[in-house]
Image (cartoon, rainbow, N blue to C red):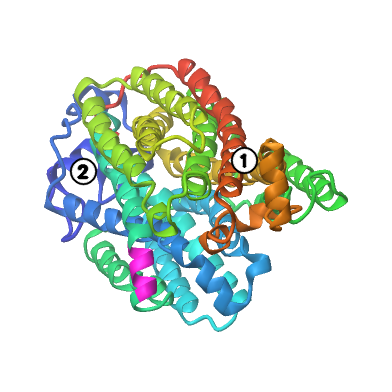
Amino acid sequence: MNAPMDRGAVTGSAVRASGTISGTTTSDMPALTPEQIEHAPAPVEFTGLDRSGKLIFAGLMLGMFVASISQTIVGPALPRIVAELHGMEHYSWIATSAMLASAVAVPIVGKFSDIFGRRAFYIGGLVVFLLGSILAGASQNFWFLVFARAVQGIGMGTLMPLSQTIIGDIIPPRQRGKYQGLMGATFGISSIAGPLLGGVITDALGWRWLFYMTLPLGALALWFIIRYMHLDHRGDRSPIDYWGMATLIPGLVLALLATSWGGSQHPWTSPVILGMYAAAAALLIVFVLIELRVPSPLIPLRILANRVVAVSILASFAIAVAMFGAIIYIPVFAQASLGVSATESGAILIPLNIALVLSSIVMGLVITKIGRYKMILIGGAATMLVGYLLLTLLDHQSSSWALTGAMSVIGIGLGMSMQTYMLVVQNAVAQTDLGVATSSVQFFRNVGSTVGIAVLGSVLAANTEPSIQKRIAELPAPLKEKLAESGGVPAGGESNAVLDPGALSHMPAPLVEAIQAGMGDAMHSVFMAAVPFAVLALILSLFVKQLPLRTHN
């Protein structure tokens, strides 16, 4: 193990701890005889990344930052983009296309990286993402931008899980917590910087530069990875599961599209949505039957027989539903019910993300120190649940400080949970399944985010207009008569104007207050709909088995 390594390889303590030589796992080496095993030296404990390992980790953080900030930086510019490219009626496709492409790419890349190695796929993912950024910035019509975002999504679906997987390759689970905490902090920082930079860049340079600005950082990450990450890999010669891909990809696309369109493009009970779900179910059932029979399945279902893995994946799904419910709809509550300006609403999530960053870093260090994770998972889920319960207590008369407090509590809970579940899964599987296990967690997070946005959005759409009309109906009769005489009581459609300060400025103050109160009632329903998912995450956390964190791979 002390033989000199090729220049740029992961060397020193990182390699000794992981049981690898230039990235070749010990499971790939010839079987040892009993005499060799008896006289083999004990694995050397991990003492930290050497210079090469630190440079690889820096490249991974850069790649993950570029991928994650691209999801948040475009938000403030979306209204301007769709207005310029004439795509308002298909607004959601800009986000949906990237989300679908990413969700489809994750399980395929995870399996292929286990077979062919991580390095080539990570480099390819960066190149595809940068190509998508160039195409998005150069878009001249709406549907070309949708296509470019899908290309970006394929890159993101490669970079996000492989960043976690490569960390699992070079750092043993016992010491992995603090490094995954830093990766979680990278995601949090991008969530803070994205909306702030997005607004400034859009106003100063135009929305196209939101895509171009990721190119220098992406190129730097690409140089780091090409220069310093040389992880040799002995490929698995098992046949590729083409039939699994042929059923999984359309099954996922149909299921996620139906979830995204249900309640918005089409009613949930419409033949279109029900037919898409039926077709998706049939394809996914066939996929499961295929995976049970092929010699090298795309997703080895045996890892789901591991209770720790299955429970952790389900909990990650529930947390993603609740998390994206907060990220997407808290700014709507702040702007439409509390009367916060559009500019201020872009920064309304900063307390949540700061709490997430700090909590992620601290919990990573704590896990590395104590070597245990179960109580942190339970505490994180319980903290997140408390935060959502605090949100349900807010109304249109609540202060911004009350909203800030609730968001901070949610952020602490998310920071304790998100990266910890990834660590738990990676620690519970064999090193040969590391890529597909990591990708499974990321995949269910992607699905959870889609479900969260769709379901909570459907709740909001169903409650907004009735809640506003109910509040208007509760106005005193003399006031309603006075408003009617001046033409101040609309017959409906207030939800279309609630986010438009210009429209509200022309309405009488009592009517504005009634509209904001109704929006607060509708958002209360949204926050209540997220609570069961937080409860589910807490219950599942109670059933996660505490396994010893391995000190080497």
Answer whether residue 29 is visible to the viewer in this image.
no
What residue lies at 46% left-to-right and 61% top-to-bottom?
Answer: 75
For residue 74, above or below residue 307: below
Mark 1: give few (<14), some (14-19) or many (20+) Cα within 10 Å.
many
The amino acid on which the numbered mark 2 sits, given as a three-letter code, is Val
The residue sitting at 83% across, 43% down in the picture is 269
Which residue is drawn at the image coordinates 12% and 43% (left, top)?
Answer: 2
Name the magenta segment's main secondary structure: helix
C-alpha distance separating marks 1 and 2: 59 Å
Locate residue 542 relative to residue 46 in the image: left or right.
right
- Per the image, the residue denoted by label 2 is 15
Residue in the foreground of this view, choosing between 374 and 16? 374
Q: Secondary structure at mark 2?
A: helix
Q: Position of residue 12 (x, y in %)?
A: 13, 45
Location of residue 238 with respect to 39 vertically, above or below:
below
Q: Is residue 45 magenta?
A: no
Quarter assignment of residue 195: bottom left
Q: Which residues are magenta?
A: 197-203
State which quadrant residue 123 falls in: bottom left
